[in-house]
Image (tube, rainbow, N blue to C red):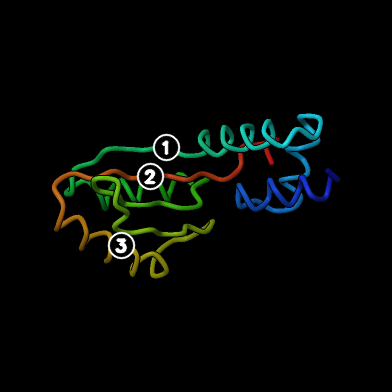
Amino acid sequence: MENLDKVDIVRKRMSVSYEEAKLALESVNWDVVEAIVKLEKEEQSRKEEIFVRGNELVEKFKELVKKGNVTKIRVKQDDKVLVEVPVTAGVVGAVLAPQLAVIGGVAALVSKCVLEIERGNPEGCH
């Protein structure tokens, strides 16, 4: 199998860019299965879950956005995604208001939920 075929397999399987697939394959001597395992581990290390009560949801959301290095926040209940918010660097004020309104609405409806935080790539990871 050619390297381009391996890149395509990893890319499609893991929903990563050509560059990310190539770098992962190179780091494991072009072993497709090892590259997929490596990318899965990296993906899991970028995700974090926080359990919150509905009344804490908006404040925790604001706190996470302020801290930065967050690319996406999902509000989940019983493994069902209720809201997914992409977070861009430097989001503040009026830009955040519509998202906070949605999060506030969800908070009013749930007693407990999970915030799944997806962070940007750690330094040196691709």
Question: Could you tell me which secondary element the residue under label 1 belongs to?
Answer: strand
The answer for how far apart the CA atoms under marks 1 and 3 are is 20 Å
Confirm or deny contact between disc 3 and disc 2 (CB under 8 A).
no
Please name the residue that numbered disc 3 is placed on: 100
Above or below 66: residue 102: below
- Give the image location of residue 15, x and y in percent: 61, 52
Indicate which label's residue lies in the foreground, 1 or 3.
Answer: 1
Is 40 left, or right, of 113 in this rendering?
A: right
Which residue is at the front of the view, 89 or 11? 11
Q: Residue at position x 33%, y 50% from top?
A: 61
The local crowd at label 1, few if under 14, some if 14 to 19, many if 20 or more residues have their Cα within 10 Å, is few
Residue type at tag 2: Glu
- Most foreground residue, 102 or 63: 102
Q: Distance between the residues labelled 3 and 2?
A: 16 Å
- Rendered position, 13 above or below 125: below
Residue type at mark 3: give it: Leu
Q: Which structural element holds mark 2?
A: strand
**Cβ atoms at labels 1 and 3 below 8 Å apart:** no
Task: Give coordinates of residue 108: x percent, y percent.
Answer: 14, 58
Determine crowd level at label 2: few under 14, some 14-19, many 20+ residues with C-alpha closer than 10 A: some
